[in-house]
Amino acid sequence: MYQVNLLPWRLRRQRQRYTFWLRCFVAQLLLVLALLVAVYGLLRYQQARQHALLQSLTQQHSELAGRIQQTQQLMAEVARLAAEDARYQHNRTQNLRYLSLLQQLSLTLPDTLWLTGFEENAKGILLRGQGGPYVAIVTFERRLAALPLLQGCHLVEVTQSKENGLAFTLAARWRQDG
């Protein structure tokens, strides 16, 4: 059996509904597509900014690493120079101490005695000499004991030398503050 639709308004209404829902679907689809494009663009923009920031920070890191290396080299140079200066000051102090001792020895040494050796070791210094009478050697020992640079001065040995004089050895220690 055939049915005839005598009411064309229903068909029109169905088409209008179909068109309406189709347009809604297309609009939603376009809206979602636009939203995805916007999110993609935003993400690309953020990625480009992050990449530029990363490059900037990498460059800063390289510059800072170079500066740190230069600073470390300068610090090593300063430490080397400080050690060299400390060695220089120590040597200067030692040399001044020796100079002062030699100047004082020239004043304290009796005319009948002369020194033949000067030796320094971990225990102190040893002075070897030759000369006249035993009294001059004892006088020299007392004078050495009175010097402000030395402490613990004492005769180690006195022997008869081949040239009819006495050979002597005196030992002393440096004063800690001298």
Image (spheres, helix red, strand yellow):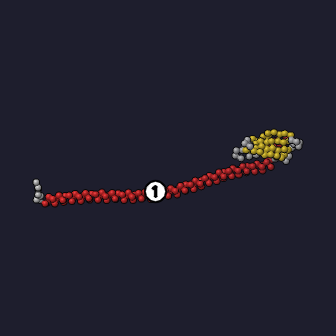
Q: Nearer the viewer, residue 164 or 49?
A: 49
The location of residue 1, given as percent across then percent down, is 10, 54
Instruction: Work out which residue is located at the far front of the displayed protein and give it.
Output: 1
The location of residue 125, given as percent across then percent down, is 76, 44
Where residue 20 sits, quadrant-wise, is bottom left
Give the residue displayed 11% in from the left and 55% down from the top.
2
Give the residue displayed 82% in from the left and 46% down from the top.
116
Amino acid marked by disc 1 = Leu
Where residue 126 sits, quadrant-wise, is top right
- In the rendered structure, the answer to whether residue 167 lies left or right of residue 36 reads right
Could you tell me which secondary element the residue under label 1 belongs to? Answer: helix
Q: Nearer the viewer, residue 144 or 127?
A: 127
The location of residue 54, given as percent across then percent down, is 46, 56
Give the residue displayed 80% in from the left and 41% down from the top.
169
Query: Which residue is under mark 1?
Result: 54
The location of residue 108, given as percent across then percent down, is 80, 47
